[in-house]
Amino acid sequence: MSIEQFVLPYNINGDDMKFQRIRDLREDADLTQTEMGKAINLPQRTYAYYESGERTVPPEVLISLAKFHNTSVDYILGLTDKK
């Protein structure tokens, strides 16, 4: 097995760590970052940091996002394409 098999697919461009799926899920729900932050009890700026990859998303936030969007943490992390 190669190391590439273990690299999480949310590293879209190889040089940034954007969580594209949380942005896509938010946009699919027609929510702003502010609205999404309020829904999971976070300030907009904190949520924006997570979405842009500037900060690591803590497990409890991943769980909140998965529950809110009725999907799995594995889907958000890109480990599966099955919502």
Image (cartoon, helix red, strand yellow):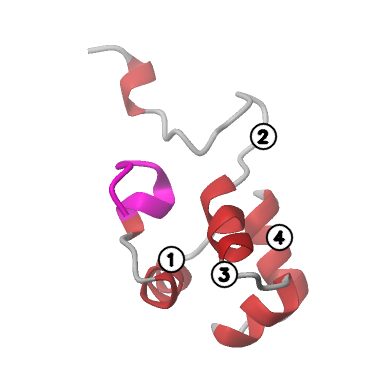
The span from disc 3 to disc 2 (Cα, nearest Å) is 24 Å
Task: Compare marks 3 and 4 and give the one earlier in the sequence.
Answer: 3
Determine the residue positioned at 31% across, 51% down: 74
- Please tell me whether mark 2 sits on a helix, a strand or a loop: loop
Which one is closest to the eye, mark 3 or mark 1?
3
Reading the image, the residue beneath label 1 is: 62
Which one is closest to the eye, mark 3 or mark 4?
3
Q: Is residue 83 left or right of residue 40?
A: left
Badge 3 crowding class, 10 Å Cα cut-off, few under 14, some 14 to 19, many 20 or more, is few
3 and 4 marks in contact (CB < 8 Å): no
**x and y, in percent, of residue 82 in the image:** 28, 48
Task: Compare marks 3 and 1 and give the one earlier in the sequence.
Answer: 3
Mark number displayed over residue 16: 2
Q: Quadrant of the N terminus?
A: top left
Reading the image, the residue beneath label 3 is: 29
Which amino acid, by three-letter code, is at mark 1?
A: Leu
- Please tell me whether mark 4 sits on a helix, a strand or a loop: helix
Which amino acid, by three-letter code, is at mark 4?
A: Tyr
Determine the residue positioned at 59% across, 65% down: 26
**x and y, in percent, of residue 30 in the image:** 65, 70
3 and 2 marks in contact (CB < 8 Å): no
Q: Quadrant of the C terminus?
A: bottom left
Task: Compare marks 3 and 2 and give the one earlier in the sequence.
Answer: 2
Q: Which residues are magenta?
A: 74-83
Task: Compare marks 4 and 1 and give the one earlier in the sequence.
Answer: 4
Name which quarter of the figure residue 32 lies in.
Answer: bottom right
The span from disc 3 to disc 4 (Cα, nearest Å) is 19 Å
Helix, strand or loop for the magenta stretch, by majority: loop
